[in-house]
Image: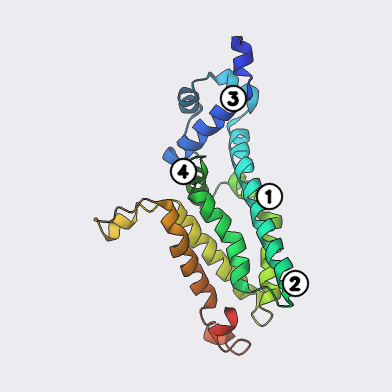
Amino acid sequence: MSARAAKNSPETRARILDAAETLFVEHGLDGTSMRMITSRAGVNLAAINYHFGSKDSLIQEIFERRVQALNQRRLEALDRAVANARQTGRAVRPSQILEAFFQPALELAADTEHGGHRFMRLLGRTHTETSPFMRRLLADLYGETLQRFLAALCGSLPGVPREEILWRFYFMMGATSYAIAGTDNLQVFDGRFDQQDPAQLIPRLMSFLLGGLRAPLPERLAPPVPSGRDLA
């Protein structure tokens, strides 16, 4: 293969994406330079310009290739839950909706062989990004999927104000992002902590999220739903 063909190959493109994703986790989006990416990927700047054109375009493709597949898994899980509920003549439980949304993300975070764990750490950290570019990108990637899930939760909890559902979903997204970003911070609380298996995160976090959903409403919202049992 000629040098030109190698520069333009799909393998080169994938290598650049993987190298950039790794560096963004290690140094952040702003802290990672194009020179660092070319060095890690073993390519020159011309290869990155050929495949992506700019750093923003490179970032966008990193997120698109992962989030689009993740959203598809989420929506497929939600569709299965809805279909199963129709077959049994029951309403979809809120807990099933949460599992459809968060379980695929946690499973991806447990994937240490194909880069899923690496990307989910990056995604968790970029949820706090304040740049207009990242806010627009995340809104575009998540928008339709989030609306589907919020509508499903509102439909399964007719007595709960939409505002309260939105707040709880927001809190759950934050907890998930922080947890996925890395468990190293647990050593701040206990220096003996050495649990690094991301698969162990799934049952613990799902239990926490479901507990948050089932929590009693604030007193000012109590009349529509007098007990947290209605949020099960």
Q: Residue 175 placed where, x, y %?
A: 48, 62
Q: Earlier in the sequence, mark 2 or mark 4?
A: 2
User: Which residue position holds label 3?
Assistant: 11
In depth, the one of 40 and 89 nearer the eye is 89
Q: Which of the two discs, 1 and 2, sits closer to the camera? A: 2
Mark 3, mark 2: which one is toward the viewer?
2
The kind of residue on which mark 1 rests is Asp
The residue under label 3 is which amino acid type?
Answer: Glu
Q: Residue at x 63, y 37 (%)?
A: 61
Image quadrant occupied by the C terminus: bottom right
Give the amino acid type for the residue marked by disc 2 in the picture. Gln
Would you identify the image quadrant in which residue 183 lies? bottom left
Q: Separation of disc 4 and disc 3 at Cα?
A: 20 Å
Neighbour tally class for label 4: few under 14, some 14-19, many 20 plus, Cα within 10 Å: some
Q: Mark 3 and mark 1: span between their CA atoms? A: 27 Å
Q: Residue furthest front?
A: 88
Work out which residue is located at the far left of the displayed protein and give it: 192
Q: Is residue 139 visible?
A: no
Q: Identify the mark nearer the N-term, 4 or 3.
A: 3
* Label 4 vs label 1, nearer the camera: 4
Which numbered dot is residue 112?
4
Q: Amino acid at mark 4?
A: Thr
Dot 3: within a 10 Å radius of its alpha carbon, few (fewer than 14), some, or many (20 or more) residues? few
Observer-side mark, 3 or 1, equals 3
Mark 2 — residue? 87
Q: Which mark is residue 140?
A: 1
- As measured in the structure, the alpha-carbon distance from the residue carrying label 1 to the one carrying label 2 is 33 Å
Q: What x and y, as percent, mark residue 204?
A: 43, 64
Residue found 69% across the figure and 69% down from its top: 152
